[in-house]
Image (spheres, grey):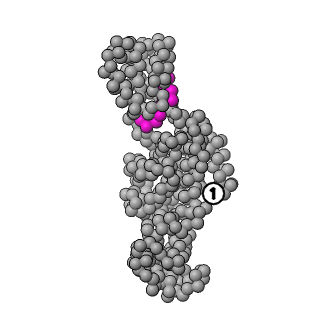
Amino acid sequence: MTDKNEIRDGSLAARDREILKDIILTYVLCAEPVSSRSVAKHGRLGLSAATIRNVMADLEEAGYLAQPHTSAGRVPTRAAYHLFIESMMETRRLSSRERRYIEDALKGGSSDPEQLMTVTTHLLSELSHQAGIVLTPAVGDTVLKTVELVPLAGRKLLFVVVSAAGFVDNKVIEAEEEIPREELVRISNYLTENFGGLTLREIRDRLLRMMADERAQMDRLLGLAIELAKSGLDLGQGPAVLVDGASSLLSHPELADIQRVRRMFETFADKARLVRMLNQCMQGKGVRVLIGEDSDLTSELDFSLVATSYGVGEQPLGTLGIFGPSRMEYHKVIPLVHYLGATLSRALAESFGGPGEKR
């Protein structure tokens, strides 16, 4: 019999690791609980069904396998998937064809960053057959590049903000008086020169301090610049979540239950909870994997999220990932997410003059 203490501390014997790996790969492929007989039939390990059955019982006791019903088959648990990802999974690079397809799709699309993200969300879904998901930046966390004030009718103005990553936000505001075009140009230049490189949140904080400054109250143009910027820099818009391919998940056997389908679509409609889950993966570099009980949403659906951050240079902008049933081809999905994160970051940097990160 297998040493149970050896299993519990995560240091499985080579034979037991091979059995667990075989069960995980078989379950991912067939979506049916795996029996000792089916593992023995593969013949790779040269072990009897009885020996494999004993090891499977120990693996179940250690928390790596679960028995969903009274059949002889077992399924991998969250702990098994994490162990597989950390120490059993063979590293797989995307093929040159896949890499070229991704690069062509992002280069061939619009230079508009929002369009780049829409394309990325579709690529995540298309290439994984799961749901692709992208968290876009919150307005207040974007770094200012330029401000432009465009006169409309009467006292109305269009306040246009362009971020360092190329995101454009605009808002119609109304000034207290009609302002000549020349003064609007001077105000635009002042705001760009003095606040470029700061996040919109930092700019708002600085503006609030400037409002109490005596010089701002004496200088008409400075006072106008502060007042217009206070109205135009709208921080109310939080990050948005883009989802593509949710309907493709309906072909997975895990979603044969109509109640689970209903819960899944409710989850995709609950943007606030999706944002919280994706924010868990924002910090640090590399790919994060949330499985089952790792977060409330993955736990409710028995789903996994494989995600990474993207950004320009050292500035993280958001998160992208693949969301679907935990029976996932992690050896394919993880390198796909990593490559799309790097390629989107590079596309944003190259399109808008930031320092691209080479990975």
Residue 209 visible to the viewer: yes
Q: Nearer the viewer, residue 167 or 310?
A: 310
Few, some or many residues within 10 Å of mark 1 (<14, 14–19, 20+): some
Q: Who's the residue at 47% across and 75% down the image?
A: 12
* Label 1 SS: loop
Q: Who's the residue at 59% across and 34% down the image?
A: 353
The residue that disc 1 covers is 94
Residue 19 visible to the viewer: no
Percent across and percent down for residue 13 are 49, 78
Q: Who's the residue at 51% across and 42% down the image?
A: 314
Q: Nearer the viewer, residue 8 or 39?
A: 8
For the record, the magenta segment spans 140-148
Percent across and percent down for residue 190 are 47, 20
Question: Can you say whether 312 is above or below 359 in the image?
Answer: above
The kind of residue tagged 1 is Leu
The reply to whether the magenta stretch includes residue 141 is yes
Percent across and percent down for residue 16 are 50, 78
Q: Nearer the viewer, residue 163 or 327?
A: 163
